[in-house]
Image (tube, coloured by chain):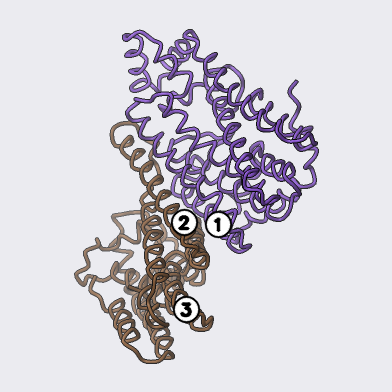
Amino acid sequence: MIKSLETIKQPIEEELKIFEKMFQEAMQSPVPLLEKINNYIFERKGKQMRPMFILLCAQLCGKINDGTFHAATFVELLHTATLIHDDVVDDANERRGSASVNALWKNKVAVTVGDYWFTQALIISLKHKQYRLLEIVSHAVKALIEGELLQSEKARKLDIEEDIYFEIIRQKTASLIAAGCAAGAASATEDAELIEKIRLFGEKIGIAFQIKDDLFDYGTDDVGKPLGIDIKEKKMTLPLIYALNNATRSDKKRIINIVKKHNENPEKVNEVIEFVRASGGLEYAEKAMLKYQADAFEILHSFPTSPARESLEDLVNFSTDRKK
Amino acid sequence: MFVFLCAKICGEIDDASYHAASLVELLHTATLVHDDVVDDSNESQGFFSLNAIWKNKIAVLVGDYLLQKGFLIALKNKRFELLEIVAEAVKEMSEGELLAISKARRFDFDEESYFKIVRKKTASLISAACKAGATSTTEDKEVIQKMKLFGEKIGIAFQLRDELFDFGSNGTSKPLGIDLKEKGISLPLVYAINNASESEQRKIINYINNEEKLEEVIAFVKASGGIEYAQKAMQKYRQEATEILQSLPASEARTSLEDLVNYVIERKR
């Protein structure tokens, strides 16, 4: 059974409060406009899955400490900055069911706010001499931008294969969760093997998490974002890639043509969604997601049972069974 | 140039100075690229708007790429102090940009906020370049602080020089008065508006958004002595920058920096 986030949070309830306070402090600014935007974002914060993973991974390996909070703050700041820039890149007007920063304050402001957050995250870590943390997340920072570049390139040519899809989500989504988990572990243990194990766990669950997100685009659940938005943005995800690879030549041509030229037309987008559903693309992607989930579980099961391990297991279940 | 000369004035140029120079240049380019992001890309349909969306995409991505590149180079070489100096500068620039945008929407500039914006938006990077250069060759906190301040002074003077070009006609390649429209802020204008009667203030603020009235705005600024005022301010900052240099022992690097200061003020474009 899938447990609520509230139950999952129990072993780290106090710590999450400390994190929230640190995060809010990190967002304080003497510039009124920035303060206003920061409040807007903070009020619409997401599920904070990343901080939860980081804190729980630290607890799994030892004791949560200042280093853990710095890791959580850095990753969440970086994640938020990335989302703001992503929305400019995708020209998206919505985020988590609300208007995006670029929709409300325009592109220039959104880009500048993202830069501000990135440098703020960097400065906080440098001030606290969190060099280890910076080293761990630096790979993720590189992967994030390279993944975004790769995705933009593919959105132009639409010549994407399964391995490229996995490469993109590994870079764009999984790398930051993996780095967060590793940084959380590194704050609580020196054991390099253990840290690498946790990093791999983060990567697996990050990939599963993203496949779930991509499935929502073809589902009917209320996910706080309009259905078919990936198609509109010419993002080729696993269900569609599978469907295309198993389609007749003429179907393939027809579907790619819609994604290329009629991606703004809701009726045509629906046609793509129906096509993907009919060809078993959703089942295929779900199976892939469950494989990554099983890998993540296997890693967790190599640890002795503890409240932290149990919560992480629940969090893994939540990542793939969530309704939004 | 600022990085290397400030490094040399404080000691021997070494690897750290080269790292400093490349980092400053990378981040400078990144912020320039992000500066190219434009608004209103989703207002009209058609070829032009698609083109604008595509250009924005590239500008954001390339800017981000350069930022992380600089970040990784500094980390790899364990230049933590240097990284903090330039990260602070980028943060200040972002703050300055946002401050300028929010002020420009209502055009409620007093001189204090004008200088705050210029210090953050324009001067912070030159200031960081000078500080980073000095940090690469000396441990002396006092000298480092001096070089940082020098950079700030010359950065502000540089900006004032640019603004004066917008009101003068001495062969600058920039179209006359473009600052009025694009940035909406310059010291001559701020001075002129703050020294005008209330009805004149309202009239001029209305004119600023109207291209046809540009000539009148420029004439108004000239008549109110805004040009002379900004010139005086520029000379004051130049003087202060020079004084900082003269508090350091004479050297080849110092002479070059003095020449650089003169170039900033006396350049023709």
Report the Cα–Cα distance between label 3 and label 1. Answer: 23 Å
Residue A314 occupies which quadrant of the picture? Answer: top right
Q: Locate the C terminus of chain A by quadrant.
A: top right
In the rendered image, residues at marks 3 and 1 fall on the same chain = no
Spot the purple chain and give its letter: A
**Residue position for label 2:** B71
Q: Indicate which disc residue A204 carries.
A: none
Instruction: Tell which tag, 3 or 2, sits nearer the viewer.
Output: 2
- Bin the neighbour count of mark 2 within 10 Å (Cα to Cα): few under 14, some 14-19, many 20 and up: many
Near-viewer residue (B165 or A274): A274
Q: Residue B177: where, in percent of width, then height?
A: 29, 62
In the rendered image, residues at marks 1 and 2 fall on the same chain = no
Chain B on-screen colour:
brown
Residue A151 occupies which quadrant of the picture? Answer: top left
Callout 2 secondary element: helix
Q: Residue A26: where, in percent of width, then height?
A: 64, 55
**Residue position for label 3:** B149
Residue drawn 68% across and 26% down?
A317
**Disc 2 residue type?**
Phe
Q: Residue B35: where, in percent of width, then height?
A: 38, 53
